[in-house]
Image (cartoon, rainbow, N blue to C red):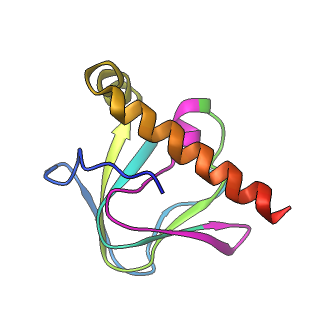
């Protein structure tokens, strides 16, 4: 999975305890997140489809498409996640082109894994 180290020293993180829901499938979303510490499970229709670790990102589809969340994100272990809103995203892309490439690689990798399941 494509990872980023851009946020490893970020101080603007949110903390979730193991089992706590970060967001629910079907909810509107205006943030994506990068895992700073811990683990996060992504669930589709109640089934875990991926477990994320430090440097992994999630929630990018809702931020980019402005459509409801396609998955639920739940803390698998106590974790810290860095929220990224649209303004921050649009500032990061030209300042750090590798960030945009990482987002695209993440989306591409997830799509390929889902294709393998069907």
The residue located at (44%, 78%) in the rendering is 76
The residue located at (65%, 43%) in the rendering is 68
Image height of 104 relative to 38, above or below: above
Res 28 seen here = no
Image height of 2 relative to 47, above or below: above
Res 5 seen here = yes
Position of residue 75 measured from the top left corner of the image (x, y, whole percent): 43, 73
Quarter of the figure with residue 66? top right
The answer to whether residue 84 is left or right of residue 42 is: left
The answer to whether residue 40 is left or right of residue 117 is: left
68 or 33, which lies in front?
33
| Range of magenta residues | 43-64
Position of residue 103 measured from the top left corner of the image (x, y, whole percent): 47, 39
2 or 12, which lies in front?
2
Q: Is residue 51 magenta?
A: yes
The residue located at (69%, 52%) in the rendering is 112
The answer to whether residue 63 is left or right of residue 118 is: left
Position of residue 109 measured from the top left corner of the image (x, y, whole percent): 60, 51
Q: Is residue 53 magenta?
A: yes
């Amino acid at each position: 999975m494509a990872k980023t180290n851009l946020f490893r020293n970020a101080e603007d993180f949110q903390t979730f305890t193991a089992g706590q829901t970060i967001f629910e499938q079907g909810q509107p979303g205006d943030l994506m997140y990068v895992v700073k510490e811990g683990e996060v499970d992504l669930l589709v229709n109640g089934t875990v489809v991926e477990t994320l670790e430090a440097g992994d990102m999630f929630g990018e589809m809702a931020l980019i498409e402005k459509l409801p969340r396609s998955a639920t994100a739940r803390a698998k272990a106590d974790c810290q996640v860095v929220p990224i809103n649209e303004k921050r995203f649009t500032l990061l892309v030209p300042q750090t082109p590798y960030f945009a490439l990482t987002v695209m690689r993440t989306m591409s990798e997830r799509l390929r894994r889902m294709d393998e399941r069907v």
